[in-house]
Amino acid sequence: MSKSYRVAILGATGAVGTELLELLESRNFPVAELKLLASERSVGRSLRFQGEDLPVELVSDRTLENVDLVLASAGGSTSKTWAAVAVEKGAVVIDNSSAFRMNPEVPLVVPEVNPLAAANHKGIIANPNCTTILMSVAIWPLHQISPIKRIVVSTYQSASGAGAKAMAEVKTQASAILQGQQPIAEVLPYPLAFNLFPHNSPLNELGYCEEEMKMVNETRKIFGDQQIRITATCIRVPVLRAHSEAINLEFANPFSADTAREILSRSPGVKLIEDWENNHFPMPIEATGQDAVLVGRIRQDISHPCGLELWLSGDQIRKGAALNAVQIAELLVEKNLLKPAKAYVSSEK
């Protein structure tokens, strides 16, 4: 019995949406029919999939009819508007926005970490924040050996985290600066080319921005452990694509760097990059376009006997967003948790 699914990409023309399209094709996801959905300003465009030019349609009640799976990457307000409509019409929604992540009724899934959580969905599965995904993939294997008590993480987040327009803006700003002109910031609040600044999401009363609190709250939910102490500092840096993170871990007992290195070298979704002689460790330029999270520079924390330091780089658009969503969809197919389109179910002799 072969099964195929009617899939819709909501937010198809954005940076993550176009990556979703590429991944569905390159990973041979069983697509019977594909709809590309977006806002009115993108209607009329077309995108190529499996050798065909598919039109971008306006998301509506009508275009969400007869869909089995919606991969949503169009922002929280759009997801809040259309996810319930899609579920009511029989689809499962994998949502890349922050709209449902902390809803106790919605699983927050990283397939390498908590795949079983996907089975508890009630129509919507949330894709975590990009920085949370990258960190979770890297540290979960260590947490399984010795529970992590405390995480101190600093992120170095590329323009891709703010979308395709932010990436284009950085290029324009860099060109302006090199020509002696004043850079103009429209997508981000300040010029990012040749500059960096704390993440521009809203601050809470403790001085933590929304992006930092996402890492705190989402990691606890994914790990199923509300006792982990986590603090984060998130920074925008002048990198086009792929985020990096410096992570300090405190365990209940000493955890050797060699043991961590051996564990991570065989962990799913992780690629160990360490060349100590040449001081070569993960870099965003090398992580760009890769599925794996690059991890390296693993060393003991000289300030704490139970501390461990590591560094990572990972493609924010790929594993930090689109790939994780597609992997969740693949997980649903593998576990028979996604109802296939009846019209496309056929017997193979």
Image (cartoon, rainbow, N blue to C red):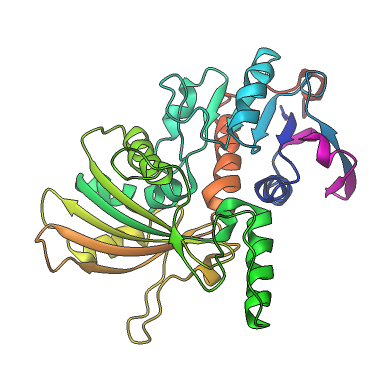
Magenta-drawn segment: 30-53
Q: Quadrant of residue 6?
A: top right
**Residue 74 or 68: which is nearer the viewer?**
74
Q: Position of residue 29 (x, y in %)?
A: 69, 41
Residue sitting at 35 percent across and 36 percent down? 217
- Taking the image as shown, residue 78 lies to the left or right of residue 343, namely left
From where the camera sits, is residue 255 visible?
Answer: no
Q: Position of residue 306 (x, y in %)?
A: 12, 57
Q: Position of residue 290 (x, y in %)?
A: 57, 61
**Residue 78 or 25: which is nearer the viewer?**
78
- Inspect the magenta stretch and tell me whether residue 39 lies in it: yes
Residue sitting at 38 percent across and 47 percent down? 136
Position of residue 117 relative to residue 30, above or below, is: above
- Taking the image as shown, residue 38 lies to the left or right of residue 226, namely right
- Inspect the magenta stretch and tell me whether residue 119 lies in it: no
Q: Position of residue 277 (x, y in %)?
A: 33, 86
From where the camera sits, is residue 322 visible?
Answer: yes
